[in-house]
Amino acid sequence: MTDLRTRPLGKSPARVSSIGLGTVGMAGFNSKVNYRQFEQAIDAAFQGGIRHFDAAPFYGYGKAEYYLGHALRELGIRDQVTLSTKAGRILKPANRYPDIKGRYAIEWVDALPFVAEYDYSYDGIMRSFEGSQFRLGQDFIDVLLMHDVGEAWHGDQAEIYWKQLADSGYKALDELRRNGYVHAVGLGVNETEAVLRASSEFDFDCALIAGRYSLLNHAPLEGAFDELHKRNVAIIAAGVFNSGILATGSSTEGAYDYQKVPEEIRDRVRRIEVVCEQFGVSLVAAAIEFVKLHPAVSTVLLGAHSAQAVRQNIQAASQQAPKDFWQALKAQGLIPEQAPTDTSVSNT
């Protein structure tokens, strides 16, 4: 993989590589990763051409930011990469405060001794941003994303936090961007609806959307991605394996959107695998390329637990399926006819 920071992130000065690396998996999500393993994964990503690294205060309750900032300094690569993190949660000492969980509570392995409190207000965002600067050891962060604002995470409490963002949170984002403390601001969510709503209220540059557009999920093709593209809101596409099933395949237990795999989903993956085998395309490569081919997508953010997994993902991302492969998937109704699959007009 040779393309570096070649893609614009909306209309902002920030630029990203076609593939980025997310750090949620290395912050204690279902497995323990020590600092040395973390640094090796970051180095493998950088050597493979990845120039966008993403973290969040929520990941390991500060561990992802703490490890990532140190790794970027130790490797001497901070000035060559785009760094994104998130706001919307303030970390507090675990021995003094209760943890406030959303719909998808995550038990981090070997997390730092903190808990998270939601706060999307002006003060909350500024405090979260400053905390991220300290943990990362960086006075400048390229991209700041509002984390998990919306109904998918907060359920019937969503409007409480949305009001915080609308009443004063947008002001904080405007100040941070206007004064040059960040290059771009956006959302980091597991839903498309929140991005459409927020970008109609505030001038966002980008949105990290996890799991909503993939070989298995096509709802954004019904107009959402076209509308965001029209608004010049660049998509950072994450969760392209739908939390596992598109990476591990139908023969494993796997997971689908952090839940047990429904039989209808497993059956669809089996049918996709048959087409993959016919054309000599790996399921992982197909899952990455399908998302990358949408013109609204600036970068595909991949997760990993090790340097080996990073290298495997980079290798898969460098593969290109033949046009007939995509036509075969469309002919069998496995992807919509309107899905962008023309490599000659993609933003690769």
Image: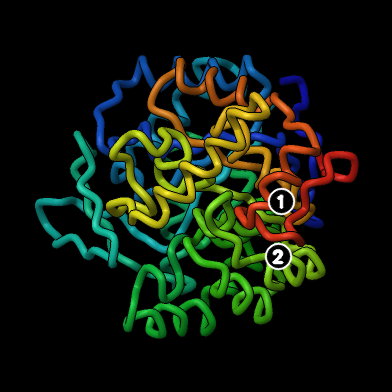
Please provide percent x and percent y for residue 251: 35, 34
Does the CB distance between marks 2 and 1 fall below 8 Å?
yes
Which residue is identified by label 2? 225
Which quadrant would the C terminus be assigned to in this image? top right
User: Where is residue 249 shown, x and y percent of the image?
Assistant: 42, 35
Q: Is residue 347 visible?
A: yes
Tell me if 51 is positioned left or right of 86 in this view: right
Q: Can you tell which mark lies on residue 329?
A: none
Q: What element carries label 2?
A: helix
Point out the tag, 2 or 1, that comes first from the N-terminus.
Answer: 2
Residue corresponding to mark 1: 297
Q: Where is residue 102 in the image (x, y as percent from the top left)?
A: 28, 66
Image mark count: 2
Tell me which corner region of the image, top left, top right, bottom left or bottom right, holds residue 92.
Answer: bottom left
**Label 1: element kind:** strand
Residue found at the very far left of the displayed protein: 95
| Residue at image coords 19%, 34% | 110
In percent of the image, x 25 and y 31: which residue is there? 31
Left or right: where 155 falls relative to 315: left
Measure the alpha-carbon separation of dots 2 and 1.
9 Å
Mark 2, Cα crowd under 10 Å, few <14 / some 14-19 / many 20+, is many
